[in-house]
Image (cartoon, helix red, strand yellow):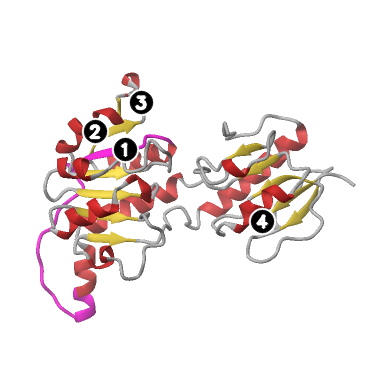
């Protein structure tokens, strides 16, 4: 029997010499997967698809369609390669980050509420143009967000885990000096020991009044209680696609805090994602069949 690949979609060309099985993560996986060597994880289907990794004795490669793979790494058997979905979500997350910023700066929730009441009350709002934006997490998604911010004529300061002076990138150690000068902070961070609680009471207190905190990375980067304390007084505002805990309980006060816009971790899942994901999966299968190096390999 030839080696097989386990795919979430049936409309991907499988290279000659490889068989295919299909599992979209919605139900039970197929039986008899002992010859599966390459597993493309279903996207955004919860914790069950990754658990299957340990039940594939012939597995050699796991392809994640997410950029963040911190929950997958501990499940990998020794010797199994892991590739992530770096680049797939860049434009989708960038669009969503800008949507959250515009919604907050142009006070869209207020106007939507007025529309529902049939009211016509006008008032000028904040703007993104000329705002000082601190971009914390300068990977491929951060760079995609920067392109849109620059097009909107915002003033962008880049921040990464370590400074890269040649690229005009500051390190996170410089945040205490950078935060007081920011009108908007955008977080695009993974969930790691170094990033958990990175934005806590002291960092939030360092921001100027009326600053906007946007998070499209992982909710654990922000101390939720500290953010609630600052937004609850109206001193700060927030646009959140990710929160901690997640999902946010229905009775959590952040839902109803004025100045806070929340979406349910949907930034990466726009219509542009799936064609790009299928193209990446097909290219990875081609490389695997040809014995070529895979893209986006992660050091587990």
Choose the circle earlier in sequence order: 1 or 3.
1
Left or right of residue 68, residue 203 in this image: left
Residue at horizontal 10%, vertical 59%? 124
Say which residue appears at 76% left-offset and 61% top-offset: 30
> Height in image: 60 above or below 215?
above
Which residue corresponds to mark 2?
Answer: 175
Closer to the eye: label 2 or 1? 2
Q: Residues within 10 Å of mark 4 (few under 14, many from 20)?
A: some
Farthest residue to the bottom: give it. 117
Mark 3–mark 2 Cα distance, whole angstroms, equals 11 Å
Task: Give the distance between the C-alpha atoms of the residues marked 1 and 3, in whole angstroms.
Answer: 11 Å
The question of residue 49 being in magenta is answered with no
Res 162 label: 3
Q: Residues within 10 Å of mark 3 (few under 14, many from 20)?
A: few
In primary-sequence order, the first of circles 4 and 2 is 4
- Chain-order first, disc 3 or disc 2: 3
> Which residue range is magenta in the image?
114-139
Q: Residue at x 35, y 22 (%)?
A: 164
Tag count in the figure?
Answer: 4
Secondary structure at numbered mark 3? loop
The image position of residue 203, as x and y in percent, is 21, 40
Quadrant containing the C terminus in the rendered view: top right
Q: Which residue is mark 1?
A: 136
Q: Is residue 129 magenta?
A: yes
**Which residue corresponds to mark 4?**
8
Assess whether mark 1 and mark 2 are in contact (beta carbons under 8 angstroms). Answer: yes
- Label 4 and label 2: CA atoms lie apart by 41 Å
């Amino acid at each position: 029997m030839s080696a097989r690949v386990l795919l979430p979609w049936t409309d991907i060309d499988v290279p000659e010499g490889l068989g295919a099985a299909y599992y979209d993560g919605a139900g039970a996986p197929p039986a008899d997967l002992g010859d599966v060597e390459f597993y493309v994880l279903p996207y955004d289907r919860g914790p069950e698809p990754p658990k299957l990794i340990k039940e594939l004795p012939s597995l050699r490669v796991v392809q994640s369609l997410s950029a963040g793979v911190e929950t997958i790494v501990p499940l990998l058997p020794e010797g199994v390669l892991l590739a992530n979905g770096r680049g797939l979500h860049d434009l989708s997350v960038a669009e969503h980050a800008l949507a959250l910023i515009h919604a907050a700066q142009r006070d869209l929730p207020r106007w939507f509420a007025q529309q529902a009441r049939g009211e016509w009350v006008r008032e000028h709002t904040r703007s993104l143009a000329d705002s000082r934006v601190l971009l914390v997490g300068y990977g491929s998604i951060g760079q995609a967000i920067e392109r849109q911010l620059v097009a909107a004529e915002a003033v962008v300061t880049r921040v990464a885990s370590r400074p890269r002076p040649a690229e005009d990138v500051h390190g996170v150690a410089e945040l205490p000096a950078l935060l007081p000068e920011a009108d908007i902070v955008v977080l695009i961070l993974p969930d790691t020991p170094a990033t958990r609680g990175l934005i806590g009471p002291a960092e939030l207190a360092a921001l100027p009044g009326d600053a906007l905190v946007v998070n499209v990375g992982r909710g654990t980067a922000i101390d939720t209680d500290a953010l609630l304390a600052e937004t609850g007084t109206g001193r700060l505002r927030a646009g959140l696609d990710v929160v901690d805990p997640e999902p946010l309980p229905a009775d959590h006060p952040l839902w109803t805090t004025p100045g806070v816009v929340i979406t349910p971790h949907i930034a990466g899942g726009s219509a542009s994602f799936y064609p790009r994901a299928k193209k990446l999966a097909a290219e990875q299968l081609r490389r695997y069949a040809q014995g070529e190096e895979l893209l986006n390999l992660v050091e587990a």
